[in-house]
Structures are given as structure tokens and as C-alpha cells.
Image (spheres, grey):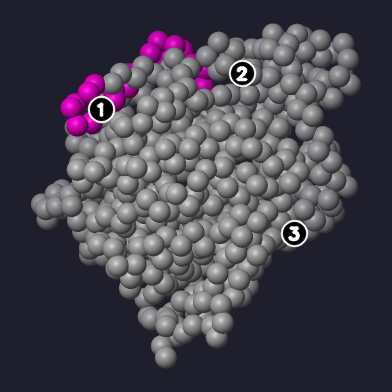
Amino acid sequence: MLTNHANLMRFFAEAKEITGRKKLQKMIYILQVCGLPFEEKYQFHFYGPYSEELSLRMEELCNLGFLLETKEDKSNFIQYEYRVTAEGLNFLEQFAVDMPQLPDLFTILKGKSARFLELAATMLYFRDLPKNEVEEKVQVVKPKQNYTQDEVQEAWTFIDQMMTKAKGTH
Amino acid sequence: MAYKDEQLHEEKVFKDPVHRYVHVRDRVIWDLIATPEFQRLRRVSQLGTTNITFHGAEHSRFNHSLGVYEIVRRILYNFRGLPHWNDDERLLCLCAALLHDLGHGPFSHSFEKVFKLDHEYFTQAIITGDTYVHRILERVRPGFAKDVADVIGKTYADKLVVSLISSQIDADRMDYLQRDAYYTGVSYGHFDMERILRVMRPMEDQVVIKSSGMHAVEDYIMSRYQMYWQVYFHPVTRSAEVILTKILHRAKYLYENNYTFKLDPTHFLSFFKGKVSLKEYIRLDETIVYYYFQQWQDEEDAILSDLCERFINRRLFKYVDFNPNVQLQELMRLQVLFQEVGIDPNYYLVVDSSSDLPYDFYRPGEEEERLPIHLLMPTHELKELSRHSDIVDAISGKKRTDHKLYFPLDFLEEKGAAATEIMEILSRQGEIDYAD
């Protein structure tokens, strides 16, 4: 009961704060693919893997006072920031959440931009395809982002690093 | 004549209570409807356990799929000759519309949660696997089945085509809102679809709405909002869903613990084992599930038997509002007390949250999460709907989460004085709703 809420709070206890909803969506997706027990269901959307379930659960955590959401108007869009509260940490204390890999994985994730995480998450979404087909698919579904070969290569390195770390600490 | 261009000698129609008629002229569409995989959708209800609350809601995924096809057919008729629209994509759009829910199983939501399945995966698998549907699609041209699967999976290159089938104002939503309103009998869910279809315009990446049609779209957004709270997230329906989910959990648990079922759960074995083949998945429909639930009422296991009896005879759990922030300690105390009086809290004390049913509200997509609805202004610029409509803006920001605690009041009443503390705690949560 409320395990999925507790799992997300464990993520926020590690992250302390996250700036940007897109960044959050892609981070949780990548961690899920790495085998962490996030159960939010993802589908492919215009901007890559997206979970409506996660969006709704975030609203619940904010409404419960476990997370603080602040908005900043960036003229052409609004940016959201999420910060864990003391009540959120109290809630988390009631659960035995086991995610030993999270600190190491988050260390790799935290410096990455939303654009980069979108690329990596999209590549992971097509992970059942051969590598060259993954790259082709990225160009098909995201022609306007104009990802360079360097970025794609960096994303492969990042994915390898994440997967290795996830396996290593299992 | 190429198979893709073949037309029926005369137009076929399906009488439909929502759209009056569903028109079919393409041979490919007619053949797809006749496949066993599509006919199976007659035996998968559109709204799962909602008929427990709204007895009229007996419609199936079959009706809905035909409805989505019909809406897309009408949209494409209006798009003929408009800039950005490539009429060569017409048959692809129609096939994707018709087949978009093909992978739904019986009580999809609960099955997916318990057995970690994804109906979208099975939609893809049926379209691209060894099936009648696949063979028909590949007769159109080699690779056509994959294109249909990509449109449904939202990974097709032409985003305009994808947005017709899946976006925040698409044929899927326009059909299910009206159809669910019709069959449940509620007075919400109605909007002027004809008007919306007339003001839809194809653009490079998406369908947009002429700004003069904004009020019709506001009505559609309002319908979604009201249907969510009044129908989709009705607390009594959730009670039935909670029991259904617990039946599946219990049956799986018993299988894993070598329980000998009186009725061998043949159709469930691959689900219990976590290795569901396409053939086994297609074989399971709601008639089969109901048969097992009927039979499992006579099982020796008291929990499985009781839960099935509750589900079949609508003897539902009652509920109170629950706030995980201030009432978590009480929940933990309740878990202990339930154990003490001999009621297993793993099956009989359940918190259900709004995020357990991720029905999608309109999201303005402020940070590129989801593509929003765009209005096409007279100046030809695009404007996000909520930035132009006060009504949509108000709904988009509204608090919309809820948690309830479900439990079998009848069991507690049978326990009498032994359950006094439990009843006191539950009463403190708020008034117990009898969900009748």
C-alpha cells in the first residue's frame, strides 16, 4: 500500500530537488529501465517516453504536502521545481524502501540536461532494436531536435555507464 | 485492382447508437473486422467494472473501435485537398484507428497491474505477429503492418497521422467520452463533435483547431473532467476493481504456494508464471474470467472463495476518505488490528489512490511533457488552448487527487466487540460510505 508513492519519495530524498517536469519524467524512466522498482507505466509521446501515472502521482505527493512545487515563468514556458518537505521525509520513514543502486545512479543522472535525458530515454525506449536501428529511429521520431552524432555517442556511453552501475550494485 | 484499393460492391453500414452509422467501403477494413482477433473485442468490455455502478455500461471494445474508425473516416473526408494532408496515408490512418485497442484483455487495468502486462505491447504483437490481422495488413504491402503498429505506438514518422489517433483531442477520446456517456446514461460527456470535426485543420506535426471552434473544444475538455469524477473514478466502481485485483493476487499467490485448485486454472497458468504467449493472451477474454470466478467461489481457500463471491454478487467493500499524510499511523494500527481479529489486511484493507487509474486530464504541456491542443488564430499563429480559454485554464490547475480506504464492513460487524477499536478508527476517518 502506497509503495509507489514511497518509492518516488525515496528518489526525492536522494535528489532533494528537481527542476523541470520533462527532466523528472525521463529520469524516472531511465531508472526504471535500469531495474529500479518504479512501476509507473510509460508510453511514447511527442517528446519521448512519458508517464501520465507519474504526473498524477506527483500531483498527489504535492497535494499531500510531501513535495513542494514552485513555478517559474520563463516567458515562453513555465518551469516547475520540486523539493522534498519534512512531511515527505516523515512519510518515507514509515516504509522500508530498498534501492541500494539509487545514490550511484543518481550521481550519473543529476548533471544531465533535459534535452540529453530525452535523447537517452528515447534510445532506451527502442532498446530491443539493434544499435543502428535505434539511431535511425531516433532521427525518425525526433527530426526537429537535430541530435548530433556526438550527442548520440555520448548517450550510448551514458547508457552503458548506467547499466553497468545498476548491475554492479544489484 | 490492388488489394489496398479494393472497394466493396456496395457500402456496408453498422448501426451505431453514438454515430448513427459506421460506414465501410474499403475491402481491407471489412476483412480486418472479420478476423478472430478483432471479433474477440466483442468479449472485452470497454469500461471493465463500471457496469457494477452504471448497469447500462455493457458496451465492448468492439463498439468503441468501430466508433474510432468512423470518426477518423469523417475527419479524413474533411481533410481531402487541404494543405499538409497526404491522402496516401488514409488507409493507414483507418487501419490504425480500427485496431488501436486490439491488445486490450479482460479487465485490462487489473490484469496489467497484477501480472505486469502492457496491452500496448500486445496490440503491437497482434499486428506484427502470426495472426489473421497481420496477414491482411501485409497484403496491402510488405511493411504495412509495421507502419500501423508504429502509428498506434506513436513512433511513426508522420506526427500528423499519429495525432489523429492519439493526442489530447483525438478520435479515441471523442468516441469513448460520447459512448461511455451514452451507455452509462449520465448527462455528462456530451459535446458538439460535428463542430470540432469541422474546425480541425491538419498542420505539419499535428491537428490544430481553428480558434472559432474554441468553445466546442472547451465543452469537450469539460466533458472529460466531469466524466472522470462522475464515471471513470466512481468510488463504487473502484471498490469492485479493488476486489478484482485482490482475486488475481490471491489466485497467483495460491498457485505459487502449490495450492491445489478444484478447477485447474489452465487459462491463467502463463499469467501466473509471468510468461504469457500471444496465443494464450488472445485466448483469455471476459467470458473465461467470469467462468473461473464463478467456479472459484467453491474453492477451499476462504479468501479466494469470499472475494469471488463478493465480485460475482456485488457484495462490495465499503470505504472512507483517507489522507496518507495525517492518517498513516492509523492505517498501520488498522493493519495490526485486522490481523488480530483474523482478517488478512493484505486482501481486506486497501488504499486506492487517484493515480491508480491514470486517466489523462488535459495538460497544457508547459514543459514539453505532452503535446497540447493548439488553436489556429486568425493571424495563423498557434496558441495553446489554456492560454486563450479561461475555462480550460481553470480546470487545468484544479486539485484533482483523492485517496480512499476500502474494507469489508460486513466482516467487521460479524466480529462484534473484537472489532470495536477498528470501527472507532474507521469512524474517525470520516463517514463510512456504504457504496450501495
Looking at the rendering, in which quadrant would you find the N terminus of chain B? bottom left
Which residues fall within the magenta stretch? A72-99
Q: Nearer the viewer, residue B307 or A58?
A: A58
Q: Nearer the viewer, residue B121 or A73?
A: A73
**Residue on which disc 2 sits:** B322
Amino acid at dot 2: Phe
Is the residue under label 2 in contact with that under label 3 (CB below 8 Å)?
no
Amino acid at dot 3: Ile
Dot 3 or dot 2: first in sequence order is 3
Image depth: mark 1 or mark 3 in front: 1
Image depth: mark 1 or mark 2 in front: 1
Residue A81 on the magenta span: yes
Residue A13: x percent and y percent?
36, 21
Estimate how packed mark 3 is, as few (under 14), some (14 to 19) or many (20 or more) residues with alpha carbons within 10 Å: some
**Residue on which disc 1 sits:** A78
Residue B288 disc label = 3
Residue at point 61%, 54% (across, down): B18
Looking at the image, residue B76 sits to the left or right of residue B353; the answer is left
The verdict on a common chain for dots 1 and 2 is no
